[in-house]
């Protein structure tokens, strides 16, 4: 058949249709007008939960700070994070170097085993 434009479903008349549905608004006697800004503010927050999905291992989470002050976060980073970042980078590079050496050694052993198997077949 010839193209007649984008397909749309046939509309069936519904005599009970009252318009687009909207959820009913129930009264809440405990609601205080203007309290929306304070609903997420917790002065006694002591714990942080983090759900992490990572593709590659090796991520480090340490010294987590929750604040609404950029200045405080910067001071905290300088006091806690900056002291350890160089050492953590050195340790990570040493680990990666060791890991690469072990991978090369395993590849070499695989090649040796394949060569030995080929010699036995001949």
Image (cartoon, helix red, strand yellow):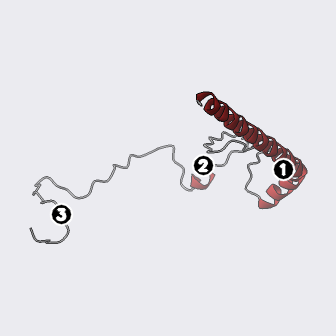
**How many numbered callouts?**
3
Q: Determine which residue is flagged by label 2.
A: 39
Q: Earlier in the sequence, mark 3 or mark 1?
A: 3
Q: As drawn, is 20 to the left or to the right of 58? A: left
Residue 89: mark = 1
Q: Determine which residue is flagged by label 3.
A: 8
Q: Earlier in the sequence, mark 2 or mark 3?
A: 3
- Disc 2 and disc 1 in contact, CB within 8 angstroms: no
Which sits in the foreground, 117 or 60? 117
Q: State whether residue 37 is above or below residue 112.
A: below
Q: Residue at x 19, y 56 (%)?
A: 18
Q: As drawn, is 44 to the left or to the right of 22? A: right
Secondary structure under badge 1?
helix
Which sits in the foreground, 63 or 25? 63
Quadrant of the rendering where the C terminus is positioned: top right
Mark nearest the camera among 3 and 1 is 1
Q: Is residue 10 visible?
A: yes
């Amino acid at each position: 058949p010839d193209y007649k434009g984008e397909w749309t479903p046939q509309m069936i008349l519904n005599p009970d249709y009252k318009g687009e549905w909207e959820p009913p608004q129930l009264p809440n006697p405990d609601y205080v007008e203007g309290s929306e800004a304070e609903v997420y503010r917790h002065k006694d927050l002591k714990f942080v939960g983090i759900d992490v999905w990572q593709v590659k291992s090796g991520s480090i989470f340490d010294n987590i700070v929750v604040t609404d002050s950029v200045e405080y976060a910067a001071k905290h980073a300088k006091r806690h994070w900056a002291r350890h970042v160089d050492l953590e980078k050195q340790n990570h590079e040493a680990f990666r170097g060791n890991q690469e050496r072990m991978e090369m050694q395993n590849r070499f052993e695989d090649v040796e085993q394949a060569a030995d198997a080929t010699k036995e077949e001949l």
